[in-house]
Image (cartoon, coloured by chain):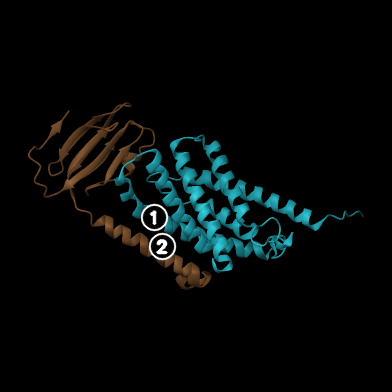
Amino acid sequence: MALKALWRRMTPLDRMLLCGLLGFALLLCVLVFRLPGGSRLVVERDDRIIYRAPLDRDRRMRLAGPLGETLAVIENGTVRVLASPCRHKVCIGMGRISRSGEWLACVPNHLLLRIEGGRSSAEDGYDLISR
Amino acid sequence: MTSSVVDPRELARCRRQIFLSLFIALAVALNTLEFMLPSPAPWFRLGFANILTLVALYLFGGRAAWTVALARILVGALLLGRLFSPGFFLSFGGGILATAMMTGARRLAGERLGPIGASLLGAAGHATGQLLVAWLLLVRHAGLWTLYPPLLLFALGAGLLNGIVADVLLGTLRRHPAFARGTTDQVGGDVSPSGE
């Protein structure tokens, strides 16, 4: 009922735009959702890698930045930020990441957490490098 | 009894200015209200202020829409104390691209484009512009674009809502004598410059 009223409000061009843009957004969502799962977490501070860890083992990390320590966890192959000294807490609000190419950033604390590699990459001879 | 004879074009211009300033004031108020609402991340905004940009676009034309959008972004940022902060550049980039898409499409398609369609285009433009600015200024990392699909989807939902509200508002306003067709569209609007 409400949908019909909405449909009548729109011009034919509006309807085309709605369907086209929604289709485009859903297609992109599907594409991103099908990205391969990542194998390791890489943390960068000012373009330098400060921490690497595999995703298949749970762990808590204290990552030092200019503002203080950002607390992040790996749980069941996903990474999220638990606590951060920054003002807006955007990095906490960004939720969990698990797929290759996804990332979490805390811009005020100069930290970038990103996920690399497919799950079955053979190059993982080590299980942790910390600097 | 005294009555002054005023040039009707002068009167219409005056009326347009007053309504545009009211639109800007309302847009800034909505912008501030939205800022106070809890939000998962600064990217996910509902963009209520865009309703007023749309109304200005449909009542007074493209230049009026640019005036409302730019004034809203600048005054809104001043009011919230975040002028020239990263968040300001995000909303500035988003606002520019959104307004460009809305006015451009309106000019190209004319009456075939309704407020809802324009609002959807504006929402998509806002999402794209924000990410573009974020990519250029903050994180030069291709992974940023994994954020784009959910952002676009959210923006389209918000844009649909804003478009409906703008359409209802336009329907109400056009019934009022101050906005009757013919008194507003011709003056200063760039849709039909033949009136001047």
Q: Which mark is residue A21?
A: 2
Q: Which of A26 and B107 is in front in this view?
A: B107
Name the amino acid, label 2.
Leu
Q: Residues within 10 Å of mark 1 (few under 14, many from 20)?
A: many
Q: Return the residue found at the far left.
A: A125
Is there any visible trace of residue A115 in the rendered image? yes
Mark 1: which secondary structure?
helix
Q: Please give left or right for residue A35 compared with residue A57 in the image.
A: right
Q: Distance between the residues labelled 2 and 1?
A: 9 Å
**Image coordinates for residue B98, horizontal then vertical, percent:** 49, 52
Query: Where B165 sits versus B128, above or below?
Result: below
Is there any visible trace of residue A77 in the rendered image? no
- Residue at 20% x, 44% y: name it: A116
The hue in which chain B appears in the rendered picture of the protein: cyan
The chain painted brown is A
| Chain of the residue on which disc 2 is drawn | A
| Chain of the residue on which disc 1 is drawn | B
Q: Residue B152 carries which label?
A: 1
**Image coordinates for residue B180, horizontal then vertical, percent:** 70, 64
Q: Quadrant of residue A66?
A: top left
Callouts 2 and 1 close, C-beta under 8 Å: yes
Name the amino acid, label 1.
Leu
